[in-house]
Every structure is written in C-alpha cells, then in structure tokens.
Image: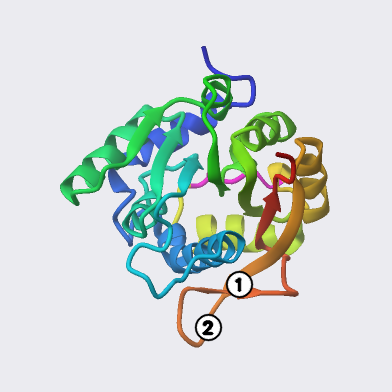
Amino acid sequence: MMSRSVDPAEVAKFDAMAAEWWDPNGPGRPLHMMNPCRLDYIVAQAAGEFGRDLSQAAPLSGLRAIDVGCGGGLLCEPLARLGAEVTGVDAAEANVRAAAAHAEAGGLGIDYRATTAEALAEGGARAEIVLAMEIVEHVADPAEFLASVASLVAPGGLLIVSTLNRTARAFGAAVVGAEWIMRWLPRGTHDWSRFIAPDTLEDMIRAGGLEPVDRKGMVPDLARGGFRLSDRDLAVNYVVTSRREDG
C-alpha cells in the first residue's frame, strides 16, 4: 500500500528516468552538477557532529545512513565508500533496480529498497544520518513526509534535507532554465507550487521533533562549474541540517 505522502504521478516521472541516472548528460545532469557540493556538505555535517577525521580512509565507518528518495544512488555510493552502512529507499521500483545494479557493478554493498519512508519507519529503521535530498518538492504531503523521515533519525542523529525555495528565482532556474531552455530535465519535472520556503520547511521539521541547526544555499559556481555553498543566498536551492536531541 502506497503512503499518502507519495504522489504516484511524481513516482512515474522518476521511474521513467531510471535507466539514465548515471548519465552525467542525461535527465540527472543537474544532480550530477550539484552532487559534489551536496556530498561535501553532508560529510562535513556528519564529521562535525560525530567527531570524525576526514583524513581517514573511511571516516563514516560505524554510522548508519538512510537516503530517502535515493534515485539511482548518486549519494548512496560515495557515502558507502566513506564507510557508512547505507540504505537507499525509493518509491520508484525502476530507480531501485538501476541503483542496485550500478552498486553491484562497483562492488558496493548498499541495501536498496523499493519502499517509502513511512513503511521504513513503521519497521523500526533508524540511522545516525538521514537524507531527504531534492524529494520534498515531489511528495503529496510534505508535512507528513517530513514527520516520517524525522522518525527515522536515531537519538543524537542528523536529518539533512535539500529542496527548492518558493521564489521567482527558483522558478526561473528550475523550471524556465533547466526544463524549458536548457532542456536538462523533462518538462513538468518541477511544479513551482510545491516549492517550500526555508522557514516553512524548518517549521515542519520541528513538528517532527527535530531542531534545525544549520542551513545553506547551493548556488552555481560560475568560475569552476558545478555548485558551491552559500551562507546568504538560499533563493533557489538550499539545504537544512537538523538534529534529534532526545535520547
């Protein structure tokens, strides 16, 4: 049974993209461009919270990570290489099959599951690092979804969520730019009415029992290509880290 927060139409969109997740010039191109920035942020937050030395070969060893809406595994694989015990979750079965095949070809033991955050939480899954990256804008009920994702966070653990701000600039970049002009994404991938302002997102996260502790923008790096973090510019893409304080 599909969760109420899952939008079947949105799942179908990403099912159709499954075979092209690892093509840097395919529909996942924006994520490939953003991935080093996303990964650097996640690893820095985890290292700071759990006292890990990033000069070590496997600095995330002993930590569990759950990536909700994992797609083809663009974040799961590097996290596994850094030593984390990774579970990748996606409601689109074709995504999970593609992700599992790619991980197996690379010799990585990642636990991929075609399921939902709600079902995983009901099964008692918990992790020190929980990710919900570029998925909140695609679910039917963001508040319910974030409550379920928050419940996956172990005591003292982190939830890291990235999404698109509800601004005219975000519409211009994600819809007009990425879909209409550059054609990096199929038309209709994003619905601006589902974009969420940072304060609204943080309120939803607090309702799930976590406390936001950091937020950054992710902005295009025109000098080097890709993206970089910004303390001030959250107008388009942004990421929020929250902590579960209770024991």
Frontmost residue, 132 versus 47: 47
Span highlighted in magenta in the image: 187-192
Q: Disc 1 on helix, strand or loop?
A: strand
Image position of 40 with respect to 158: above or below? below
Residue 49 figure quarter: bottom right
Residue located 30% across and 53% down the image: 22
Q: Residue 160's x, y, as percent?
A: 61, 52
Image position of 67 with respect to 25: above or below? above
Residue located 75% across and 35% down the image: 208
Label 2, label 1: how many angstroms apart (C-alpha)?
Answer: 9 Å
Q: Is residue 188 visible?
A: no
Number of labels in the image equals 2
Which residue is most to the front? 247
Q: Is residue 174 visible?
A: yes
Name the side, left or right, on which 28 lies relative to 37.
left
Give the color scheme: rainbow, by chain, secondary structure or one colour: rainbow
Q: Main secondary structure of the magenta part?
A: loop
Q: Residues within 10 Å of mark 1 (few under 14, many from 20)?
A: some
Q: Which residue is mark 1?
A: 219
Q: Residues within 10 Å of mark 2 (few under 14, many from 20)?
A: few
Q: Confirm whether the magenta stretch covers residue 219.
A: no
Residue located 39% across and 55% down the image: 61
Residue 109 figure quarter: top left
Q: Residue 134's x, y, as percent?
A: 56, 49
Q: Residue 8's x, y, as percent?
A: 53, 24
Frontmost residue, 178 versus 141: 141
Residue located 52% across and 60% down the image: 178
Q: Amino acid at mark 1?
A: Val
Q: Which residue is mark 2?
A: 222
